[in-house]
Structure formats: structure tokens, C-alpha cells
Image (cartoon, rainbow, N blue to C red):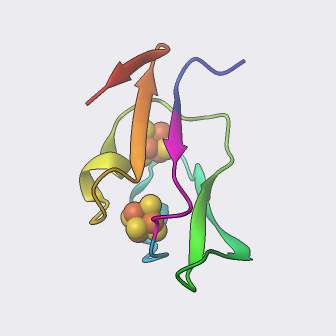
Amino acid sequence: MAKNYIKLDGTVCKGCRVCVEACPKQCIVISSEINKMGYQFAKFENPNCIGCGICFYVCPEPGTITVYKDEEEKK
Ligand code: SF4
Ligand code: SF4
């Protein structure tokens, strides 16, 4: 089980893809599903997450991404 991971709330994501482009480990993909706001939302899929937090810092939607590094919640 991966020790570093993110939680990404697909219900508030606006599908801007900034996190997809920014992740150095290609951990985030855009879903083919559409959320209730009509956006194709981002999903965390890749086990290679290093917990760097870049996705958290670049996401323009507050609270969408939470990063867990070494299984500890990080801001
Ligand atoms: S914490 Fe870093 S490696 Fe993990 S999903 Fe976010 S940008 Fe990618
Ligand atoms: S940067 Fe935020 S709003 Fe944009 S696709 Fe990623 S999680 Fe969604």
C-alpha cells in the first residue's frame, strides 16, 4: 500500500487539469465521468505519488486536494 497519496474530491473539482499537468509523477488523470457541476473531474490513480504537494498548491479550488505524506495529513 502506498504511503504517500492524495485525496481528491471529484464533486468540487472543476476539471481544469492544472494538477494533471503539474504532477511530476503523472499520478492524476481526468475521469471520463462527469460530476454534478458538469465537469470531467480529476482522479488520483497512480501509486507513484511522492507526497510533494504540488497538486495541492496548484489547484485553484480550495479543499479539493488533500495530500497525505507517510500517511500523515499535510497542509
Ligand atoms: S503529491 Fe505530488 S506526486 Fe502526489 S499526486 Fe500530488 S503532485 Fe503528484
Ligand atoms: S487542479 Fe483542482 S480543480 Fe483543477 S483538475 Fe486538478 S483537482 Fe480539479
Q: Quadrant of residue 36?
A: bottom right
Direction from residue 31 to residue 60 in the image, left or right: left
Direction from residue 75 to residue 18 in the image, left or right: right
Q: Residue furthest bottom?
A: 38
Q: Quadrant of ligand 2?
A: bottom left
Task: Kindly tell me whether residue 21 is visible in this rendering.
Answer: no
Q: Decide: is 66 above or below 2.
A: below
Q: Quadrant of residue 32?
A: bottom right
Identify which residue is drawn at 38% across, 21% down: 73
Front residue (pair 17, 61): 61
Task: Kindly tell me whether residue 17 is visible in this rendering.
Answer: yes
Front residue (pair 24, 54): 54
Direction from residue 31 to residue 65 in the image, left or right: left
Q: For the N terminus, give its image quadrant.
A: top right
Direction from residue 69 to residue 30 in the image, left or right: right
Horizontal and vertical percent position of residue 49: 54, 35
Identify which residue is drawn at 25% across, 31% down: 75
Horizontal and vertical percent position of residue 50: 47, 30
> Is residue 34 located in the magenta-colored stretch of the structure?
no
Horizontal and vertical percent position of residue 60: 27, 66
Q: Decide: is 4 above or below 72.
A: below
Identify which residue is drawn at 51% across, 49% down: 8
Identify which residue is drawn at 58% across, 49% down: 27
Q: Decide: is 22 above or below 46.
A: below
Q: Decide: is 12 above or below 4.
A: below
Front residue (pair 14, 37): 37
Region of the chain picked out in magenta, as a range: 6-13
